[in-house]
Image: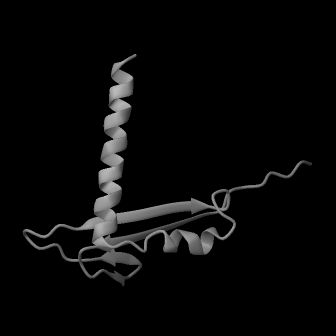
Amino acid sequence: MKSITTAQVRVAARVIGAAGAIDNDQLVFTLGRVQTLTLVSCVMSNRDAADYQRSHVAALSLTPDDVEAHSAAHAAFGSVLAQILVGY
């Protein structure tokens, strides 16, 4: 019988912009009327990194400025991709 290596996956989530807490195995936070929050998640498997059990949490070590920079880079990539696709 041939064995099959399966992927092992970890998921982490974090709220940036408010204090979050774990209550009854749930992420709980309060959103104010004019407050902006960012929910960041990371899914990583043993196929992504050998130390995926720790790497997925480290990937969430972001500041609000980091989120803004990642968001701007993602928007720029999307804009370039859209321009490429229009040419086809």
Q: Residue at x 47, y 63 (%)?
A: 42
Residue that appears at 35% across and 57% down: 70
Identify the image's colour scheme: rainbow, by chain, secondary structure or one colour. one colour
Locate residue 47 relative to residue 40 in the image: left or right.
Answer: right
Foreground pick, 79 / 4: 79
Q: Position of residue 62 (x, y in %)?
A: 38, 71
For the residue pair 86 and 22, the one nearer the viewer reads as 86
Q: Percent x, y for residue 56?
A: 53, 69
Q: Is residue 19 left or right of residue 59?
A: left
Q: How many marks?
A: 0
In the figure, residue 14 lies in which quadrant?
Answer: bottom left
**Residue pictured at 65% horizontal, 63% vertical:** 49
Toward the top, the furthest residue is 88
Q: Is residue 22 above or below residue 88?
A: below
Residue 44 location, quadrant: bottom right
- Residue 78 position in % (x across, y down): 34, 39
Camera-side residue of 72 and 56: 72
Q: Is residue 5 left or right of residue 23?
A: right
Can you tell which quarter of the image residue 31 is in?
A: bottom left
